[in-house]
Image (spheres, helix red, strand yellow):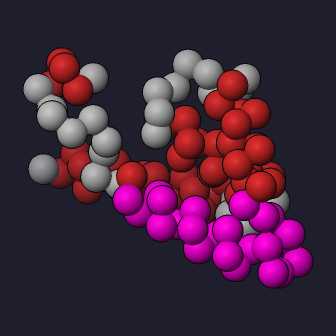
Amino acid sequence: MTAKYGVENPLPPWKTSLDGLCDVLDKSCAADELQFTFKDRRDEEDELTATRYVDLPYPESQLVSLAHSLLARGVINEADLRERLDAIRARLEAD
């Protein structure tokens, strides 16, 4: 995709936010009732990107795997996720 659009930096601008979110989850969720440790998160990410999301490029596969894990644990729900995605899509299409 980067070659198609002539982009020199292959990482999307939201990648740093994703990394920050993962860092926060790694520190905070391991201590609460979720017990979602760094190892748990990375193991799930590795499994999901190798199987269910194998056709997605990186870092999109990382993002979708994280959303999958958070949905499975009830941290977020599908309605909230859909609402946020719709709001983002509306902002992007407004430009």
| Residue 72, percent from left and from top | 80, 52
State the residue at coordinates (59%, 73%): 24
Q: Is residue 60 above or below residue 41?
A: above
Question: Which residue is at the front of the view, 32 or 72?
Answer: 32
State the residue at coordinates (11%, 26%): 6
Q: Is residue 27 left or right of residue 82?
A: right
Q: Is residue 21 magenta?
A: yes
| Residue 29, percent from left and from top | 75, 74
- Using the rendered view, name the quadrant where residue 51 is placed: top right
Most prominent secondary structure in the magenta stretch? helix
- Quadrant of the drawing holding the N terminus: top left
| Residue 35, percent from left and from top | 86, 69
State the residue at coordinates (84%, 70%): 34
- Using the rendered view, name the quadrant where residue 4 is placed: top left
State the residue at coordinates (70%, 79%): 28
Magenta stretch: give its range: 16-38
Q: Is residue 84 left or right of residue 94?
A: right
Residue 64 visible in rendering: yes
Residue 68 visible in rendering: no
| Residue 82, percent from left and from top | 55, 52
Q: Is residue 77 magenta?
A: no
Q: Is residue 55 left or right of residue 36?
A: left
Q: How many marks?
A: 0
Farthest residue, direction front: 39
